[in-house]
Image (cartoon, rainbow, N blue to C red):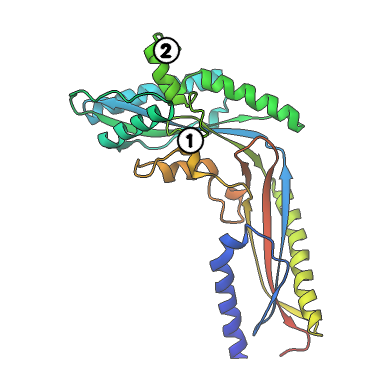
Amino acid sequence: MMRNHISLVALAMLLCAIWPAQSQAQFSQGETGAAGVVGSGSTTLDRLPNLMRLQLVITADGKDIKEALGKLKEKQAVVKEKLQKLGAVDSSVSFTDAQAQDANQQQQMERMIQMRNGRVAKPAKNQAPVVTLVTILKAEWPLAAKTGDELLVESQELQAKVKSAYLGSGKADKPATPEQEEVAEEEQGMNDGQGQGNPRGPAFLFVRKISAEEREAARAAAFKKAHDDAARLAKSAGLELGQLRLLASNAASTGMVNSNMFGDMDGMGYQGRGRYNMGGDQDSDSEDSSEAIGMQVGKVGYRVTVYTSFAFKGAP
């Protein structure tokens, strides 16, 4: 009896350790163990998104930290005003805490954007040291589309409006000179024709909020699959399922957030946080992770996986 108890505890620890990997795939076969027989099952919900989420890097320069912070606050105020006119949900608009960016990294990013756009990098001039602050904007818009075609039209029109607002410039109006417009277009990623992420460009995700009722129904369906999975394996050995020993679940979006969507930002100081804000914590079956997220226009998926362990009928 003690040995079975220890095996059951070890099994629970193993399932907890491999949840993130298992939540991305359905297991069609169970495994036998000292605790009995293990089964797993998954149910995927495919839905049209009802939100479009924007994330954009906002920067501000100054001769010192105070000046840069002041300019960043001014930019944030202008951006909030523009987002209101664009119809963004007020409660969804947020900015991460400002972080200082190294001057060498700033120059590296500017050269990278120029190279991607096919422009020759301008030689650096002797300039006084500047402080660059970085924050990440997040905002959302509701989507009313009921079909894939409607979603395509609605999302493309909305993205065009967002890009034409030049949110990254932090200016109330469209850039007045060709030089200013060129810089703003680089920041908005409008000249990036190579399919590469622009660190300063807007990133859009398509999101579907999954209701509690939908999650519960999916979890019940996944449990039935896990039970049947374990029962089939037990039957193959001429046995029947007994008492349920272990029950666990996990849920996550099936969409993968590609790190390249933010460009080559390693070492820039905001890559990890940006990805977290875009997709949220998708590694637990909770209210906070009840989102299906995709990078492409179309349906998004949300997978619920249930893990079970049963004793054999008649076993001590």
Identify the residue position indicated by label 1 in the image.
197
Asked whether residue 171 is in view, the answer is no
Seen in the picture, residue 246 relative to 99 is either above or below; the reply is: below
Q: What element carries label 1?
A: loop
State the SS at label 2: loop
Disc 1 vs disc 2: Cβ atoms closer than 8 Å? no
Provide residue 272's location: percent of width, then percent of height. 43, 46
Residue 288 screen position, x and y as percent:
57, 48
Q: Going 43% across and 26% down the picture, which residue do you hit?
A: 117
| Front: mark 1 or 2 | 1
Check the image and report above or below for 28 versus 38: above
Sequence-earlier tag: 1 or 2: 2
The amino acid beneath tag 1 is Gly
Mark 2 lies on residue: 175
Residue at left 41%, top 37%?
A: 96
Give the quarter of the image for residue 86.
Answer: top right
Residue at x 59% of width, y 89% of height: 3
